[in-house]
Amino acid sequence: MVRVQEEELQNQRLAIYCRSFVIFGLMFYIYILHSPSFDKYYIGYTDDFNQRLVAHNSTERNTYTKKYRPWEIAAVFECGNERGGAMKIEKYAIL
């Protein structure tokens, strides 16, 4: 219960931080994936989070996310139209 509350608080902080970067144009997103089978989380950024979910669940490359499949989207936040801004937010976001 406490962990869930901490995660919700972290998600709220991340959402507030992301909203400060929203600009018109191509939109980048921070996404949080959850692996229910292993209770693991993964944070990434993209301009197409649905495509990234498919890629995380189907890639044949040896990646961190391949080990903990299947992944589900736990949260998505708009972060503006600059990749650099999304990258900075991704680095800030710690679960």
Image (spheres, rainbow, N blue to C red):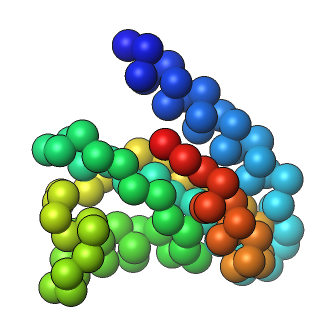
Residue 26 pos. (x, y %): 72, 80
Quadrant placement of the N terminus: top left
| Residue appearing at x 46%, y 53% in the figure | 32
| Residue appearing at x 81%, y 61% in the figure | 22
Residue 39 visible in this rendered orientation of the protein: yes
Residue 78 visible in this rendered orientation of the protein: no
Residue 78 pos. (x, y %): 67, 59
Q: State whether residue 86 is above or below residue 17.
A: below
| Residue appearing at x 20%, y 70% in the figure | 66
In the displayed structure image, the side of residue 38 where residue 30 appears, left or right: right
In the displayed structure image, the side of residue 59 where residue 15 appears, left or right: right
Q: Nearer the viewer, residue 94 or 18?
A: 94
Q: Nearer the viewer, residue 30 or 95?
A: 95
Q: Nearer the viewer, residue 75 or 43?
A: 43
Residue 39 pos. (x, y %): 24, 40
In the displayed structure image, the side of residue 19 where residue 12 appears, left or right: left
Q: State whether residue 85 is above or below residue 73.
A: below
In the displayed structure image, the side of residue 16 where residue 44 appears, left or right: left
Residue 5 pos. (x, y %): 50, 19
| Residue appearing at x 66%, y 71% in the figure | 87
